[in-house]
Image (tube, rainbow, N blue to C red):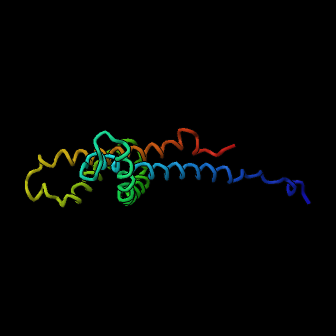
Amino acid sequence: MSDSSFISKPLRASPQPRRQAMGRRVALLALGFLLAPLVPAVVLAAASPGLGVEPGDIASLLPIAAILYFPSALFVGVFGIAIFIFLWRLNLIRWWSAVLSGFASGVLLSSVVGDFRWMRSGLFMAELPALLVWGACGAASGLIIWLSWKAGTAFGLDRPVA
């Protein structure tokens, strides 16, 4: 036997630290998707005195916001995950793309829920404040998701843990 047969191959690094880092990154992204619906839920609860929220009263705001969290989470999940995957595939996950896509999603959702009444009535200016508020809620939600995505790279979670 020759001496070269006893030369061992270099040891490969264990995939475990990389899996841990990826698991943390996925957990942070999931946290972002869970926090993002808080924005529209709280805004809708605060802007709807007919739901029983007293102006300036946090105690009456929180239960209504908790109820509104679930439909908000559904919409953020449906729109947000689809848009996130689309932008990820294009390698376009940036703060501005998150804000723009969130704003567009908020305006679209407001228009769909409002049955596009501004288009039928021709009163776009009357509906503009609502469209801008929901666009801003969507933009804030998109920014929260982007921040959760970037948190993994900011703390070095995209690199293997030693």
Q: How many numbered marks are there? A: 0
Q: In this view, does 159 lie to the left or right of 45?
A: right
Closer to the camera in the image, 151 or 46: 46
- Seen at 13% across and 54% down, the residue is 118
Q: Position of residue 124 (x, y in %)?
A: 12, 50
Closer to the camera in the image, 54 or 151: 54
Which residue is at the far left? 122
Which residue is at the far right? 1
Q: Position of residue 26 (x, y in %)?
A: 53, 52
Quadrant the N terminus occupies: bottom right
Quadrant the C terminus occupies: top right
Closer to the camera in the image, 94 or 38: 38
Picture quadrant where residue 72 is located = bottom left
- Seen at 7% across and 54% down, the residue is 122
Q: In this view, does 19 lie to the left or right of 150?
A: right
Q: Is residue 115 left or right of residue 84?
A: left
Q: Position of residue 27 (x, y in %)?
A: 54, 51
With respect to residue 85, does 132 lie above or below? Answer: above
- Seen at 41% across and 57% down, the residue is 81
- Seen at 67% across and 49% down, the residue is 17
Q: Position of residue 39 (x, y in %)?
A: 36, 46
